[in-house]
Amino acid sequence: MSYWIRGEYEEAETYWKLAKRAKELELPEDVIETFVVLAKESREHGDRLREIYVRSYGENPVEVGIPGVEAEALKLEMDTPKDVLEVLARAMETELFAESLYEKLATETGSDSLKSIYLYLAEIERGHYERLKCEFEVCKKIYEKS
């Protein structure tokens, strides 16, 4: 669980950086807002998982030295506005991956409360994927015309 907590915080930082870079590149406001929303939600996921950890174990999460899967996969640079398509595609992949991992955790835990939390987080990751997919389609149309 410590790994997932750290991963959500790292993912939030990555989405904040993507939002900042999207703004610098003067990308559509919807793209910037999507990155901001995903950053906030990832931070909230980390906070929620941390609360559960502290409540369950009575201490702060242990430090893990393994980078989060989603954040690592998203560490792409956007040098030009057209790069946003690659970033959005990669972000979509990472959200689907996170969804499948949370679903796997839900099937393997013996705790009903953790199962509910993991399934909830899987749904949220699916929502992130859908939001990114919409932005991808919009940007694809914009950049195909140019």
Image (cartoon, rainbow, N blue to C red):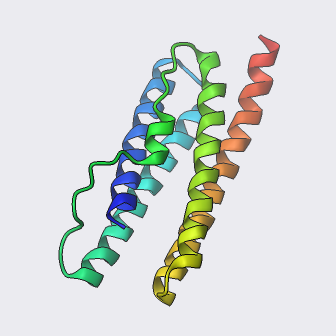
- Whether residue 10 sits left or right of residue 96 in the image: it is left
Direction top: furthest residue? 146
Q: Depth check: 100 or 126 in front?
A: 100
Residue at image point 57% right, 42% down: 34
Residue at image point 71% right, 43% down: 133
Residue 123 position within the rendered picture, expressed as x and y whole percent measured from the top left: 62, 66
Q: Is residue 55 above or below residue 7?
A: below
Direction left: furthest residue? 59
Residue at image point 69% right, 38% down: 135
Q: Depth check: 91 or 104 in front?
A: 104
- Whether residue 93 sits left or right of residue 44 in the image: it is right
Residue 26 position within the rendered picture, expressed as x and y whole percent measured from the top left: 54, 19
- Whether residue 135 sits left or right of residue 51 in the image: it is right
Residue 33 position within the rendered picture, expressed as x and y whole percent measured from the top left: 54, 40
Q: Depth check: 106 or 144 in front?
A: 106
Quadrant of image for the N terminus = bottom left
Q: Depth check: 119 or 146 in front?
A: 119
Q: How many marks?
A: 0
Q: Is residue 142 above or below residue 96?
A: above
Residue 100 position within the rendered picture, expressed as x and y whole percent measured from the top left: 62, 60
Residue 93 picture quarter: top right
Residue at image point 51% right, 49% down: 38
Quadrant of image for the C terminus = top right
